[in-house]
Image (spheres, grey):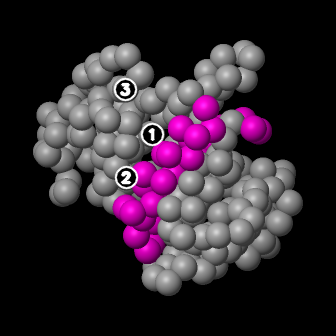
Amino acid sequence: MGRKPAGRLGYLIDPTDLVRASTCDAGQSLEPLTIALADASATTRVGSAIASELRAGMVVTLEGDLGAGKTTLVRGALRALGVEGAIKSPTFALVEHYPLSSIYFYHIDFYRFAESAEWETSGLADCFRADSVCFVEWPERVAGMLPPADLSLALSFASTDGAGRTLAVRANSESGERCVSAIAAAFSYPQLPD
């Protein structure tokens, strides 16, 4: 799937409807794809869906409040890639590393960073390499320091009782576009047009 031409339509998706979003001019990202996730298994399914589209050098950012499901989504990707055993949040360790056969997979959490200057002393810049995939929680804590994200994911609570989540997905590169198409297919929605 190549770069989309000017005038391409994006989609906003919810569980009951498919609505065309605004047109996209070349070089601009589409409106985010929005999906309602009923439970943790749906969040895991998102991670599983994008796993086969992950390529070395990719950066995936994850935004959302504590408990929104960021680590659950990453766990889905890692399970689909064959990782067994404990997959935990890197909140206290800052980074969890999973060496896979073809890439290094880093799950990084900047929640504990009080200021973006901590990026300089953390050594975490070394994780962002051509042979790695980095999933980054709380990217806003190091604003301007991260390499550009290929895929941006934002999870929010769908209701005040904590049931369900809403996922907004934005592709920022061709690799990100492949991930968006994989998510749309996993939820049986039409894929983005070529």
Give, as a single range, the part of the protein colored magenta. Answer: 39-67
Residue located at (67% from left, 23% from top): 163
Q: Is residue 46 magenta?
A: yes
Residue 54, position in %: x, y?
Answer: 42, 64
The label shown at residue 13 is 3
The Cα–Cα distance between marks 3 and 2, rounded to whole angstroms, is: 15 Å
Give how far apart the Cα atoms at labels 1 and 3 are.
Answer: 10 Å
Give the amino acid type for the residue marked by disc 1 in the picture.
Answer: Val
Foreground label between 1 and 3: 3
The answer to whether one can see residue 74 in this image is yes
Residue 121 horizontal/vertical position (percent): 79, 73
Q: What element carries label 2?
A: helix
In this orientation, which residue lies closer to the viewer: 153 or 26?
Answer: 153
- For the residue marked with disc 3, what is the amino acid? Ile
In the drawing, what numbered circle is on residue 100?
none
For label 1, count other residues whose C-alpha is less than 10 Å away and answer few (under 14), some (14-19) or many (20+). Answer: many
Q: Is residue 85 above or below residue 13?
A: below
The local crowd at label 3, few if under 14, some if 14 to 19, many if 20 or more residues have their Cα within 10 Å, is many
Q: Residue 169 carries which label?
A: 1
Residue 179 tag number: 2
Labels 1 and 3: the sequence-earlier one? 3
Name the one closer to the observer, 64 or 101.
101
Check if mark 2's residue and mark 1's residue have beta carbons within 8 Å: yes
Quadrant assignment, res 92: bottom right
